Amino acid sequence: MLNDTTTERSTDYTKELARLRLLAQTSQENGVTSWLKDRAGQDLHTYEPLVWETVADLPENPHLDSDLFSLRQGTETSGQVDLTTHEMKVEMRQIVAMNRRVRAIRVARMDHLNADKAILYFHGGAYYGGTPEDVLVAMRYLAEQSQCVVYNVDYALAPEQPYPAGILDGLAVVAALKPDYREISLSGDSAGASIALAVSQLCRSMGICTIDSHLLFYPTLIQGSDHHGKLWDDRTIDIVPEQRPAMHRFYQLFEQLDTIMTNYYVDGQALDLTAPLLSPLLADPQSFKRTTVLIGEFDPFRLQAEAFIKQVGLANGDAHYIRYGGMSHAFLNFTGNVPAVQDALEMAAKLV
């Protein structure tokens, strides 16, 4: 339900991908360059059909079970299609630094094995679930298109290893790789994007390095959010009337998820949820140079992502915002099946 995938492919995949690739930037103001890649014609403000299948049958007032086993099952993925056309090298690495041992999957083109730019990627999964393998197909394509070496990090998961364990794993990987690369960028999806932003802050404040760019796929950016506030007001989202009830039910589901994942992430620790490592929306936006947010039109985290990128743009003047019509949360699960996902990975590769 929360992480649905498909083995089907969108109709007119090639034609729609070509259209998306040709769309020019929509605006450039207050330090943010935006691309609003809406669906065309009569499909404007409607769900992409394969995404619609994942939300159409949600019941009224949906309930999300907080049982950890059930939640982790909901983060499993399948059915993605490899998009690469070059020979790739994928290998497991054990990275040891700062008294931590972290597994990472190193992905690179065979003709760019010694590239001097690296991307460290943190998978999604609401802090309690997911694995690097879930996004491996997407990371192969990102590595190919960016010609960077991608390190897909297997960071510690809550509640067995709650905050800040996952962040410290990421910090250790940066510290270990820093001598080997001219540029290091951080990336992630959903909760993994939040981990990436926390790692970036620590790298800067501890003097380890300044992160060169940030690629954030549908990030979660604030803990303990007011679900009745403007960051969750789905009434402000344009959508055709017949699909609005389903979108609202999906928002209701994510409001529950938002609380559940925070509870597992902090695991009973007496913490200030407004701390910038926990809630990057409340961090100093000058910390995040060259930041790109890629998000779906109907993603429940869209409004907080828009608030974040506006702050970062005003502070640094080098932010990018790319929104995909018809898409919702966790769209990397549709890699190779929905053309917007391929376009998003290509855009991210260009902006690294």
Image (spheres, rainbow, N blue to C red):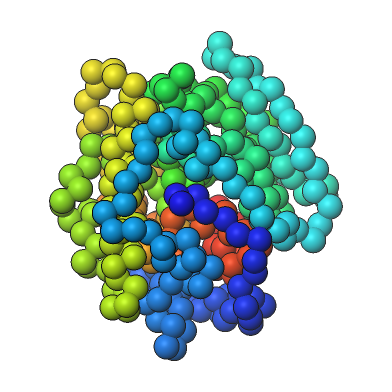
| Residue sitting at x 64%, y 66% | 8
Instruction: Work out whether residue 115 or residue 18 is closer to the camera in this orientation and state it.
Output: 18
Q: Indicate the position of residue 17 as horizontal and vertical percent values.
A: 61, 75
Q: Indicate the position of residue 205 as horizontal and vertical percent values.
A: 37, 27
| Residue sitting at x 35%, y 43% | 64
Residue 294 horizontal side relative to residue 77, left or right: left
In the displayed structure, 246 sits above or below 211; it is below
Q: Indicate the position of residue 25 as horizontal and vertical percent values.
A: 44, 74
Residue 286 at least partly seen: no
Q: Quadrant of residue 268?
A: top left
Q: Indicate the position of residue 63 as horizontal and vertical percent values.
A: 32, 46
Instruction: Work out whether residue 72 or residue 339 is closer to the camera in this orientation and state it.
Output: 72
**Residue lying furthest bottom:** 41
In the displayed structure, 269 sits above or below 117; it is above
| Residue sitting at x 50%, y 43% | 74
Q: Quadrant of residue 342?
A: bottom right
Residue 157 at least partly seen: yes
In the displayed structure, 41 sits above or below 67; it is below
Residue 213 horizontal side relative to residue 337, left or right: left
| Residue sitting at x 29%, y 67% | 245
